[in-house]
Amino acid sequence: MNRTGLLLRLELPSDPEILCVVRSAVMRLTEEMGFSTEECRGLTRAVDEALANIIRHAYDGRPDQPIEVLCRRLQNRTGSEQRAGLEIVLVDHGAAPDRKKLCGRSLDDVRPGGLGMHFIQGGVDVMQYTSQAHRNRLRLVKYLPAAVSEPQLTKGD
Amino acid sequence: MKISARRMDKTTILDISGDIDLAHSTEVRRMVLLEFRENRTPRVILNLSDVNYIDSSGVASLVEGLKASRDVGSRLILFGLSPIAHEVLQLSRLLKIFEIYDTEDMALEA
């Protein structure tokens, strides 16, 4: 696997039937990158829920609209600290979401619906949303634990 | 996803297999609500042992089923939760809201 840059690029229709394929791809990718089983499940859930939101809200259930998924390996350096991770960007051209609904609802209120944002936020370290000229962009980032992020040293280094 | 019903005296067991996600949660919702609202089944048991994945729309279907059961004085019981299904209900803080058992026998005896 490439150590930096683009890892996976998917162009898919806004069809709920395709979500299982994306879940499989993201799960496998996160496993390959060294995330824990729990982190892999959390990231996969976050991407799945974000795509479901695009299908339901941005495209109002229309199954033939375009969605782009870009997965990149991150290698951020902050001072002396180096953190690797996975950046997943979802792009659609549907209606922009209501920003008030991007924070999710209280879990103390037991009722159907409204859990998706909690699942997204719970699976990632960073969630950034931008909307410009009919182009909605959701950026999700999950950092690897420090032990996995650090470059592997070979004997003699 | 596949869903089938086993009906016995005062109890219906719905065997579900596959993923309860955006593509299929409406079918689960329809089947569960049918049992409570149309058939007036006193006890509906969901067999989730072959369910690989549940998303938020799937959880919403279960919560709606639970509310429908309470509206008509019936019971909704779950059994055979996979680690993923268990994790989703835990994240939703719903584990204590549902009646959950490990096996079908335990669910039937409850």
Image (tube, helix red, strand yellow):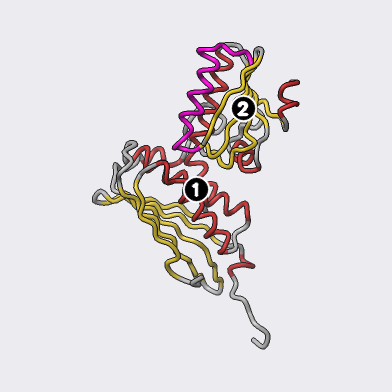
> Residue B73's x, y, as percent?
60, 11
Residue at 49% in and 61% down: A86
Which residue was labeled with disc 1?
A46
Asked where in the image residue B50 lies, by quadrant, the reply is top right
Q: Label 1: few (<14), some or many (≥20) within 10 Å?
A: many
Which residue was labeled with disc 2?
B46
Q: Nearer the viewer, residue B87 or B5?
A: B5
Q: Chain of mark 2?
A: B
Asked where in the image residue A64 lies, by quadrant, the reply is top left
Residue at 31% in and 40% down: A59
Q: Chain of mark 1?
A: A
Residue at 39% in and 53% down: A90
Residue at 46% in and 60% down: A87
> Residue B52's x, y, as percent?
58, 42
Question: In this picture, which residue range is highlighted in magenta?
Answer: B21-44
> Pointer 1 and pointer 2: residues touching (CB < 8 Å)?
no
Q: Nearer the viewer, residue B75 or A156?
A: B75
User: Given the image, on which type of amino acid does mark 2 rest?
Assistant: Leu
Disc number at residue B66?
A: none
> Residue B108's x, y, as percent?
72, 22
Queried whether the magenta region covers residue B41, the answer comes back as yes
Queried whether the magenta region covers residue A107, the answer comes back as no
Side of B36 relative to A87 (left or right): right
Asked where in the image residue A143 lies, by quadrant, the reply is bottom right
- Name the element at disc 2: strand
Q: Is residue B106 above or below residue A29?
A: above
Side of A109 relative to B47 (left or right): left
Measure how far apart labels 1 and 2 are at the Cα level: 26 Å
Q: Is residue A46 above or below residue A147?
A: above
Side of A120 relative to A151 (left or right): left
